[in-house]
Amino acid sequence: MPAPKPSNFQALADAWDNPDTFAAELLKYYSDLEASGHRIPADDITTACRTPGAAA
């Protein structure tokens, strides 16, 4: 499912040269995506993986 255009697109564009402001606007965008169901949670990569051939 493609993500929609950010509602704060202009604010993101205006903040492009200011990393702190851009990060804050990006956080708003991700929050909007999550609230609208467009952001799919990432898999938990912190769980241990068993290496093939390794002792258990």
Image (cartoon, grey):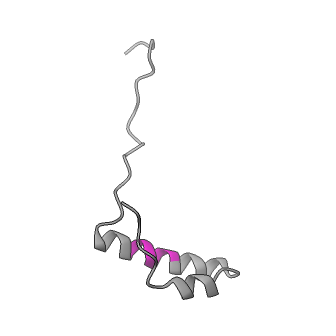
Picture layout, residue 36 above or below residue 55: below
Question: Residue shown at 48%/85% (left/top)?
Answer: 8
Q: Position of residue 55 (x, y in %)?
A: 41, 12
In the rendered image, residue 26, in percent from the top left (x then y), is placed at 51, 75
Front residue (pair 20, 30): 30
Image quadrant occupied by the C terminus? top left
Is residue 28 magenta-colored?
yes
Q: Is residue 54 above or below residue 30?
A: above
Q: Which residues are magenta?
A: 26-31
The main secondary structure of the magenta stretch is: helix
- The quarter in which the N terminus is drawn is bottom left
Corner quadrant of residue 52 = top left
Q: Describe residue 18's horizontal placement relative to residue 34 as left or right.
A: right
Picture quadrant where residue 53 is located: top left
Q: 46 and 13: which one is in front?
A: 13
Image point (37%, 71%), residue name: 33
| Rendered view: 33 above or below 47 | below
Is residue 10 rendered magenta in the image? no
Give left or right: position of 9 versus 18.
left
Instruction: Tell how many labels.
Output: 0
Query: Residue 24: x, y in percent?
Result: 52, 80
54 left or right of 13 in image: left
Residue 31, quarter of picture = bottom left
